[in-house]
Image (cartoon, rainbow, N blue to C red):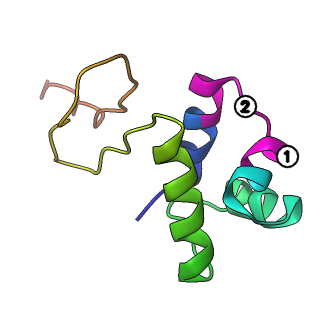
Amino acid sequence: MITSAQIRAARALLGMDQRALAEKAGLSLPTIQRMEASDGQVRGVVDSLVKVVQALDAAGIELIGENTTSSGGGRGVRLREAKAPPNS
């Protein structure tokens, strides 16, 4: 699944606003806004989520799931798990 943070980060990497993503995905602006406003994983109509992923993929974004490796080259951003503080 895609997270709201991944959508925002992908748009930032592309220099794309919400309206442009909505147009590329064939969705309404409020749909994109709702997706990005959600906490964690985006919940919604599967067809809409697929359209967003496809639009980002067509624009050159590789979405990397948790505990997976990147299959391509190029620049990117990945959020790693926070390290546990050492025992004192």
Secondary structure, magenta segment, majority class: helix
Q: Measure how far apart labels 1 and 2 are at the Cα level.
A: 8 Å
Q: Amino acid at mark 1?
A: Arg
For the C terminus, give its image quadrant: top left
For the N terminus, give its image quadrant: bottom left
Q: Which image quadrant is residue 47 in?
A: bottom right
**Residue at horizontal 38%, vertical 23%?**
76
- Image coordinates for residue 32, horizontal then vertical, percent: 75, 58
* Residue denoted by label 1: 19
**Residue at horizontal 46%, vertical 34%?**
60
Examine the structure image and report whether residue 36 is included in the region drawn in magenta: no
Indicate which disc residue 16 carries: 2
Q: Secondary structure at mark 2?
A: loop
Examine the structure image and report whether residue 15 is included in the region drawn in magenta: yes
Could you tell whether 13 is left or right of 79 in the image? Answer: right
Question: Magenta region: which residues?
Answer: 11-21
Q: Amino acid at mark 2?
A: Met
